[in-house]
Amino acid sequence: MWASGLTVLAILLVITGFVVIRGIGAIDLEFISAMPIAGGREGGILPMIVGTLCIIAISTIVATPIAVASGIYLTEYAGTHPLSKIVTFGAEWLAGIPSIIFGLFGFAFFVVLLEWGFSILSGGMILACMILNETIRTTQEAIKAVPGSYREASYALGATKWQTVSRVVLPSAAPGILTGVILGIGRAAGETAALMLTAGSFMALPTSLFSSVRPMSLHVYLLAIAEIHPGAVARAFGTATLLILTVLIANLSSRAIKNYYTRGLRQER
Amino acid sequence: MSYTGERLKIVVRNLNVYYGKTQALKDVSLDVQANKVTAVIGPSGCGKSTFIRTLNRMNDIIPGTRVEGKITLEGQDIYGNNVSAVEVRRRVGMVFQKSNPFPKSIFENVAYGLRINGLITRESGSLRERIEKALADAALWDEVKDRLNTSAFELSIGQQQRLCIARALAIEPEVILFDEPCSALDPIATAKIEDLLRDLKSKYTIVIVTHSMQQAARVSDLTGFFLLGEMVEYGLTSEIFSRPKDKRTEDYITGRFG
Ligand SMILES: Nc1ncnc2c1ncn2[C@@H]1O[C@H](COP(=O)(O)OP(=O)(O)O)[C@@H](O)[C@H]1O
Ligand SMILES: [Mg+2]
């Protein structure tokens, strides 16, 4: 048992350690605040950071309400209705589709058919589809974790189902839902293949939702496959290190929220 | 069994309750008198909770429950087609075995029922006054008046239970159901709630489930003894405890089983 645990830990440390050791040296104030020069071989990665943030923002803004609404519907209202199984199955299936296929769809639908072009909007929408399942699942878990005694108390005061859900269940589940949203952000930050075909790889600062951007993850890929150049390699590792840190921070903060929240619940019983 | 001359608040006739295929209550008929404390006693699992939860339709939220028979509140059939469970619960409040305040402030816990039922008028101060009154009626005001905005979870368990009582009182129901409200409390906290029950009956009709016969004897006017889903005997508390008519009641109150 603990040997397998050690193996996992070792793999984690080797991969992240390797990347971080090679990348940390490239990160300074200029790296995160300057424009790239010579195709990214020199200068900083400001537009990539901004592009990534914009895409994450769009995907979160689009996915969260849909996921929370579905999560509430599935846990509170659907019961054994066949639609519930279909939605759950659909969302799970969505999560299993390889990301390049999301990219292909996003390209054909958002980029070409809707004429959004390679853009923050196209990339954000396709990421929204990709993080939907996980956010629905965390919402469902968070809602199920709300003690039944709260609902009873609310109903006993003459509350309707919707009043109970909106005023008692959702506020209690909010920290858990937030955890799911943050995990979704962490996942979105690292997505590459789907964004290659939807967000493009333009290296300027975006000016609108229809601007093409080069997400950080894609920047890592493009620098790495370019001809060997010490500046490019260093910046690829530097960008990768920032991504690792972002995902780490997302995971740690969602864990912190979850701990804080479950501790609160335990005390309440 | 009815007592002529007394005003009846709730009339239960031939009540059968099923959880799926298992029958939890068998042909229960009982009259709850207005402004009296009615105690429901009996060994664990005999259907006491099931019984009082039919009085405010709380069993409706458990899937697979079936209720047969008739229950009227002031003459109105609470399971009638034109009556909603929400309306019934608005008139028949409930306090649970485990105190269950919301994860909100003391103030918001009491305000909740007023808000959802649209009982807050625009006059300033009115909400605060109603909350103060409810907390005072639940004998909690003096202990919390300086910290209304702190979390309800910072109160002791006994205070939390009185907060739940205040929360139920705030919307001014006609009947309040208590399901073993003191089972998690120490004797001092229990005594406070028992005092409260005696005070409340001038304004409210009270039904209390208890597994403590001493408590039933101390606080109630009438007592019903339940066994295996049946109501064995119902009458004045003083008579049930001094001259039980049924052998099973006698065995229970003398501690021969249960
Ligand atoms: N939600 C439920 N589903 C199935 N059976 C239940 C449920 N609640 C109670 N029961 C059963 O109904 C019977 C009466 O339970 P209850 O009313 O809780 O008794 P009491 O409050 O007197 O201890 C018990 O046999 C119990 O197992
Ligand atoms: Mg019980």
Image (cartoon, grey):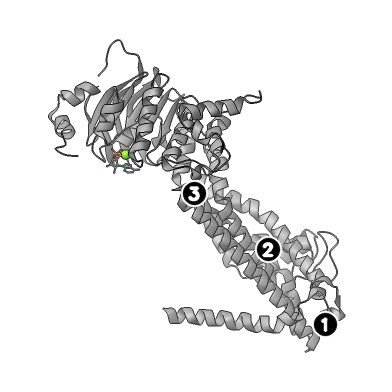
First in residue order: circle 3 vs circle 2: 2
Image position of A250 with respect to A238: above or below: above
Q: Secondary structure at mark 2?
A: helix
Q: Secondary structure at mark 1?
A: loop
The residue located at (44%, 25%) in the rendering is B81
Q: Quadrant of residue B129?
A: top right
Q: Where on the image, by quarter, is ligand 2?
A: top left
Q: Do the residues at discs 3 and 2 belong to one chain?
A: yes
The residue located at (57%, 61%) in the rendering is A256
User: Looking at the picture, how far across and down is residue A66, in whole percent?
Assistant: 63, 52
Q: Do the residues at discs 1 and 2 belong to one chain?
A: yes
Q: Which mark is residue A41?
A: 1
Marks 1/2: CA distance? 28 Å
User: Looking at the picture, how far across and down is residue A3, in whole percent?
Assistant: 44, 82
The residue located at (51%, 52%) in the rendering is A264
Q: Amino acid at mark 2?
A: Leu
Q: Which residue is mark 2?
A: A127
First in residue order: circle 3 vs circle 1: 1
Image position of B157 with respect to A262: above or below: above
The residue located at (69%, 77%) in the rendering is A241
Q: Say which quadrant the C terminus of chain B sits in.
A: top left
Q: Is residue B181 visible?
A: no
Q: Is residue B156 visible?
A: yes
Q: Amino acid at mark 3?
A: Val
Chain letter of disc 3 in the image:
A
Q: Which residue is mark 3?
A: A146
